[in-house]
Image (cartoon, grey):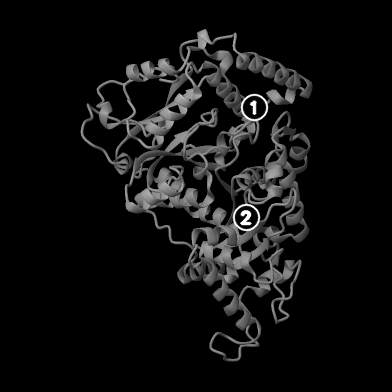
Amino acid sequence: QYQGQTVASVGINNISMSTLDPMPFSRTLLIPDGPTISGNFESSDFLNMPTAAWTLKKIPEDERNHLLWYEAQQRRVFNRNDAVDTNVIAEGARFARHSLAIYSWVLYVYMNPVLGIPNLIYSRFAEFMHECGRDSKGHADSNQNTSSQHENSNFTSNSSDSFFCNVAHGNTIGDNWFHAHRNALLAHSGLDESDLIYANFNNKYNQMPYSIIIDHKWQSVILAIRGTLSLEDCLVDVLVHPDPLDELGRMYGFDGEGQYCHSGVLSCVKYILNDLERHGILDSLLTGVGAPYSHYALRITGHSLGGGCSVLLGYCMRQRFPNLRVIPISPPGGLMSWRLATECKDFVTSFVLDSDLVPRLSIQTMEQLRDEILEMIARIKVPKIQVVKTFVVKGVLGRNKETTNPEDLAYENSQLLHSKENIPQNSKFYEQMEKFKAIQQERKEKRGGYTNIKLFPPGKMVHLVKTGERRSVFQSVAKCMTCCTTNVGYEYTPVWVDNDDFNEIQVSPTMGFDHFPNRVCLEIERVAIAFGIDTSPGSSQQDREENETLRGTLF
């Protein structure tokens, strides 16, 4: 039911629906296969049985009849007994952590409000003592060098004086004297200092911070790109108009003819490509003469805007690194044309957390939401104060339990709203709304045909669907402090979905928090733990020794 009308019909029989109701605001219902299902289910139970998911996908307005607005589509739920599914979750959990780490000290302190700053101060002090020729115990250490200095010497591009001591950090650009970005990145990811090959923290218009690190546990050279954090990044985000990829495709060996991409993403990718080519870091590590990690794979990851950049970078670099993999976390919905968004499924796997706003954002979905909100206001038949009262009493305070019976729900809505066919046309608001629509349509026509170009999220899509809730005192406090907008305490089940499943902005209390990089990372890791996957960060000494053994065997 939607706005008092039946908008979709799903033919499911022999299911005890009382135990399988979807979570509030969800468009997805999980159905275990087999005979009649009854009893109570935990969301983790779905991971141990063959399961199907029914999701409601909005029908485009030009294809929709007046009765049904949605079509029911069956999707496959991940199974922990499937080796491919397990590997996808393991990869997502591992590289979501790297996409979080590049956010550096801001997210580190946000996630560790008590110990974050003391930990960074201690790291800087220990580093200071080492740089000045002493370790933390005061012994002389002036001739000792880290094992990674010879690896980084070939592409040193900048140095800075540290506090009190004149020591160069050639593998880091744009950090402060406190080295907060660098030390927080290492703390986030559990990496050793020698694993950080290069980091560029400069953040200007069209310049996204990124890092290159070595992950011995996954035998990967990782290029991690930061997402939106500064005002400059927000300006890039709003460059949503499509730019053609014909020229870029010819330069880097992929078919971009007639294809388009988010304009802001394209400009950021050009900057990163130029910076990488100027230093030649990836070639030195993976393909050059005597490359120390030629037996490793290149993996590119990023969150949000960084996730969008990672996909286009993957297209540009795949000719040189044919075995690369791209793992975008919460990529933009209006990213690239359908062909490019689907042709990259062999090397791109995207992750989306529940009702996350950004993977659903595009010109079309924003216009659609705007028009539906205006129409909803025009349909209201009672004083606005009564609508607010209903929201406060039933939604915020929860004094009256909301009904789940379709007939009761339709009746309640009919008391508040006119039907879509009977919207009063003699009101001042309706006149203003129609005038506004005419002006917007005129502006759209003047801007040209590019506004009708549809862009989609990329690759194979993994949707973490909210299927349960872990109630606790901490969750209750978090909900109270965030006015019920937090997603802390919910349980999620991974489901394979299509690239056009996110063709509607799903208004939900958690639509903002579902995009936070720390929340996405932690929930993917929690799902991975449910699959029996080790999610410990960093690389162990055994991983490093195995790498040296493999290098000796190959070379």
In the image, 99 versus 363, the foreground residue is 363
Q: Is mark 2 on a helix, strand or loop?
A: strand
In the image, 266 versus 326, the foreground residue is 266
Residue occupying image coordinates x 38% and y 44%:
490
The answer to whether residue 209 shows anywhere in this view is yes
Residue 28 in the image: x percent, y percent? Answer: 41, 30
Residue 22: give its label: none
Q: Is mark 1 on a helix, strand or loop?
A: loop
Q: Mark 2 points at which residue?
A: 223
Given the current orientation, which residue lies at the most extreme bottom position?
139
Q: Which of marks 2 and 1 is in front?
A: 1
- The three-letter code of the residue at mark 2 reads Leu
The answer to whether residue 27 shows anywhere in this view is no
Residue 170 in the image: x percent, y percent? Answer: 71, 70
- Quadrant holding the N terminus: top left
Of the residues under marks 2 and 1, which one precedes in the sequence?
2
Residue 32 in the image: x percent, y percent? Answer: 30, 32
Looking at the image, is 322 positioned above or below residue 366? below
Q: Mark 1 points at which residue?
A: 454
- Quadrant holding the C terminus: bottom right
Residue occupying image coordinates x 61% and y 29%:
366
- The three-letter code of the residue at mark 1 reads Lys
**Mark 2–mark 1 contact, CB under 8 Å?**
no
Separation of marks 2 and 1 at Cα, in angstroms: 28 Å
